[in-house]
Image (tube, helix red, strand yellow):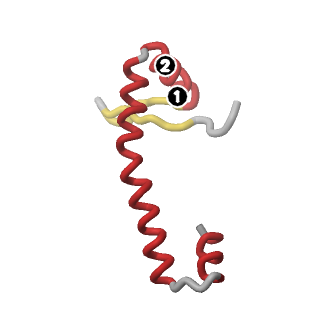
Amino acid sequence: MQNRFETSAKNGLSVDDIAQYELGGAIAILVKFAPAVFWMLLYVYAQLGILGDVRKEVGSIMTSSVVEPDTPWWSLIRLGGA
């Protein structure tokens, strides 16, 4: 982000122009994000083998406990590669 700003400013764009450009990029990402997540989740839930693999992978880095009755709490126990 900082490199894009520096490059744009160095090439004569005003802060308003840079802001409009960045806003356009953010909107484009958000517009494409929701459909991509929908299709990914649909695919994962449609393929039982993949759903099991995802549950196993997520379960290996998370722990659950009950803080209050009927209120589960999940925590990450490990981030990064194995």
Kindly state the secondary structure of the residue where label 1 is placed.
helix
Q: Quadrant of the N terminus?
A: bottom right
Q: Is residue 57 left or right of residue 80?
A: left
Q: Quadrant of the C terminus?
A: top right
Rendered view: 28 above or below 79: below
Q: Residue at 63% across / 82% down in the picture?
A: 11
Mark 2 — residue? 50
Kindly state the secondary structure of the residue where label 2 is placed.
helix
The mark that comes first in sequence, 2 or 1, is: 2
Q: Position of residue 37 (x, y in %)?
A: 40, 38
Rendered view: 12 above or below 69: below
Asked where in the image residue 40 lies, by quadrant, the reply is top left
Q: Residue at 39% across / 54% down in the picture?
A: 30
Closer-to-camera residue (68/27): 27
Label disc, if present, on residue 40 of the rendered structure: none
Q: Residue at 57% across / 31% down in the picture?
A: 61
Kind of residue at badge 1: Val
How crowded pointer 2 is (Cα within 10 Å; few <14, some 14-19, many 20+) is rated as: few
Q: Residue furthest right?
A: 82
Q: Is residue 44 left or right of residue 2?
A: left
Q: Residue at 48% across / 22% down in the picture?
A: 55
Front label number (2 vs 1): 2
How crowded pointer 1 is (Cα within 10 Å; few <14, some 14-19, many 20+) is rated as: few
Asked where in the image residue 45 lies, by quadrant, the reply is top left
Kind of residue at badge 2: Ile
Q: Position of residue 34 (x, y in %)?
A: 36, 44
Rendered view: 3 above or below 9: above
Rendered view: 48 above or below 27: above
Q: Position of residue 54 (x, y in %)?
A: 50, 24
Label disc, if present, on residue 58 of the rendered structure: 1
